[in-house]
Amino acid sequence: MCGIAGIVTQGAGVNSELFDALTMLQHRGQDAAGMITNDGDRLYLRKENGLVRDVFAKDEHMVMLRGNMGVAHVRYPTAGCSTSAEAQPFYTNTPFGISLSHNGNLTNAEELKQELFLQDRRHLNTESDSEVLLNVFAHELMQRGALRLSPDDVFAAVSGVHQRCRGAYACVAMITGFGVVGFRDPFGIRPAVYGRRLGPNGVDYLIASESVALDALGFEIIGDIAPGEAVLITLDGKLHKRQCAANPTYSPCLFEYVYLARPDSVMDNIYVYKARLRMGVKLAEKILREWPDHDIDVVIPIPDTSRVAGAELAARLGVPYREGFIKNRYIGRTFIMPGQAQRKKSVRQKLNPIDLEFKGKNVLLVDDSIVRGTTSKEIIQMAREAGAMKVYFASASPPVRYPNVYGIDMPTASELVAHGHTVEELQRMLGADRLIYQDLNDLIEAVRAGNPRITRFDTSVFTGEYITQDITTEYLNQLELFRSDAAKAARKRASSTVIEIQNA
């Protein structure tokens, strides 16, 4: 889960524009941020661990980033490690000087690393699959052998990427002195949208993960980059696009609409806000169908992502809707925090209950999903401590039972509370008086109603069925060894030891 942005303007520098775009995409990654700009034949890069406002906190950081073309990134590390060296964008000098930002995860990264080293003779400096993708794209572009680039060369390179890379990838890549290209994998798993704005010197273009970035900067949305499609904006302000995959199949990630995206975004022509309203409707219909004599006194959402669904659910049940938890705005999204201990500690720092909304009442808490269970269990306990008589819990999505391999930090089955457990067992484990999950078909209908042309979604976290059809038990076992909280903690300790030795 990351956020990407790429911009080409015909006027002033892009540094402040990319900064604003990243700020609008901060919810997609809190671990690191980066930006690279192009001014003539010079590149200017700034990237570091931290929030956008901290990475670019000093005036000299922004003044340094000159040019009217650039790409940027906010990161949450689902692959590789969390050192600042793995912050994006990544850059390679050969050919032409290419910079790339990537959202997603390559499922054949290890195989590609061997190919790049043994066949393509390209060196990788990090463990990030994004650097792998950059070098595959660079190699494919170099194979064209062109001294002067054309759009055909770029689109041929993207076609080569599609033939070699598997998994999820939404990318923006800047070719020095030429332009910015955005492309998505042939399934369109991760989102990317592009738009234009008429400036004083011509038409500007912006590519970003979500439409909110375009809205904030005054860009008119042209559309989503289609699965397998590439959109190229050359430095002279011309737009080119082409389908570069042989058999593209629209299969966007369903969890984007449940949790990852902002409610004011439009993704693949689906309004996220409306999709979440419909999730609330479907959940209310299930409660009325299976529990018609419910004794719910009040519906309270877990802020922020469940507010829309919770409000609509309460309206359909005819039950008061109340804001029972106040959120500390200075604590980040607990779901994307690295480490179980940090996530657990942050729950009570992040949310504080208003006792009078709980005292003596049967409360239905509504959340967008239950992943590791850490947050849900703590919140249920907080509701009881605030005086609730009974605490019911509803999830706007089905049980998350399987790892995500396409760029969301749900890496291991053993860390997912629903894996291997029935709803009744989960109810006891979480300490709820009743636990209600959304049915998968209802969730799909709630989202698909916004764009009936999409007939398939990536639902792998709910079903264990991976649309790339290349995920084996061995792959998942290796993923657990490398990406579990325990594995990440071990790498962090090892990294700290190296730093201490170097400083000694």
Image (spheres, grey):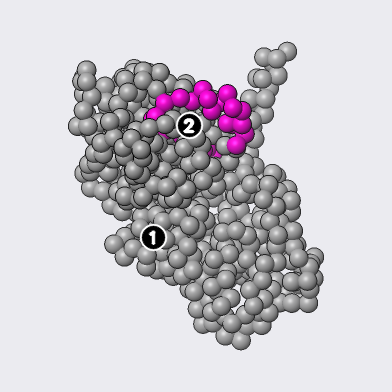
Tell which circle, 2 or 1, labels the residue nearer the N-terminal end.
Answer: 2
Q: Secondary structure at mark 1?
A: strand
**In the rendered structure, which amino acid carries the disc numbered 1?**
Ile
In front: mark 2 or mark 1?
A: 2
Spot occupied by residue 432 in the image (x, y as percentages of width and height):
68, 68
The residue that appears at 26% across and 22% down in the rendered structure is 142
- Quadrant of the image occupied by residue 182: top left
**Residue 296 left/right relative to 244:** right
Spot occupied by residue 56 in the image (x, y as percentages of width and height):
58, 31
The residue that appears at 28% across and 44% down in the rendered structure is 228
- Residue underneath mark 2: 15
Q: Is residue 492 above or below residue 182?
A: above
- Residue underneath mark 1: 270
Tell me, for residue 73, which label it has, or none. none
Question: What span is colored magenta in the figure?
Answer: 53-80
Q: From this viewpoint, is residue 469 visible?
A: no
Spot occupied by residue 467 in the image (x, y as percentages of width and height):
35, 51
Residue 407 highlighted magenta (yes or no):
no
